Image (cartoon, helix red, strand yellow):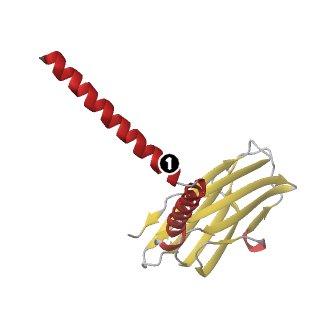
Amino acid sequence: MSDEYDEEMEEELHEMSQEIGERVKEIAENIHPMRVALAGVIFIMLIGALASTWYWVIPRDDVEINVMYLQRNGHVVLTELVNDGSREITNVTLTVEFVDVEKTVLDSLQVSFDSISSHTSISGDKMELDVRGYSVWEEYTIQIEIVWTNFRGEVNTEQFLHKVSENVTEKFHNDCEEVTWFL
């Protein structure tokens, strides 16, 4: 009796799989490759919309400082300030100091900005530090401090130290890597 039951089950499963196979074949014949391509393009557009929402719309505070150190006829420190956040920052003060091993400030610069728009970078002559008259064979430290107010009125302060002496050229990217989300 169990053999008959097994045979009936096998027959039913075979018929069911045949029906499913026919339906899949019908659906495959009705779907045009152009429709599949169009669906892929729409999917990519949706992913792009989500990514741009993150970058442009969702409130976030993302301040970065890029520093390049060069040894020439002295020491040159080039600084770039980037507001990569989606909102403006205000009351920005950036201080860069070139310090020797005895903690003596050999030269410094300080720049202030009332506001920096979102997705904006600032660099240029007023953010260059040119230190002449000191040996290129000694160890020095670049000390950076930035203070800014985010769009919620919260004051942020970050400080960074970069030791220089080994290389003629060094790049320090993305100080202030921390991103603050305002959700």
- Please tell me which residue is depicted at 48% across the width and 75% down the height of the picture: 150
Name the kind of residue labelled 1 in the image.
Ala
Q: Which residue is mark 1?
A: 28
Q: Is residue 21 above or below residue 146?
A: above
| Residue 146: x %, y % from top left | 56, 67
Does residue 74 lie above or below 122 as drawn? Answer: above
Q: Nearer the viewer, residue 85 or 97?
A: 85
Identified at 61% across, 61% down, the residue is 144
- Label 1, residues with CA under 10 Å away: few <14, some 14-19, many ≥20: few
Is 15 left or right of 163, judged from the image as shown? Answer: left
From the viewer's perspective, tell me whether residue 182 is left or right of residue 121: left
Task: Indicate the quadrant where residue 17 lies.
Answer: top left
Q: x and y percent of residue 52 in the render?
A: 55, 67
Which sits in the foreground, 83 or 147?
83
Q: Residue furthest bottom?
A: 114
In the displayed structure, 19 sits above or below 38; it is: above
Q: Is residue 176 visible?
A: no
Left or right: 169, with 156 as reference point: right
Q: Nearer the viewer, residue 94 or 87?
A: 87
Q: Quadrant of the C terminus?
A: bottom left
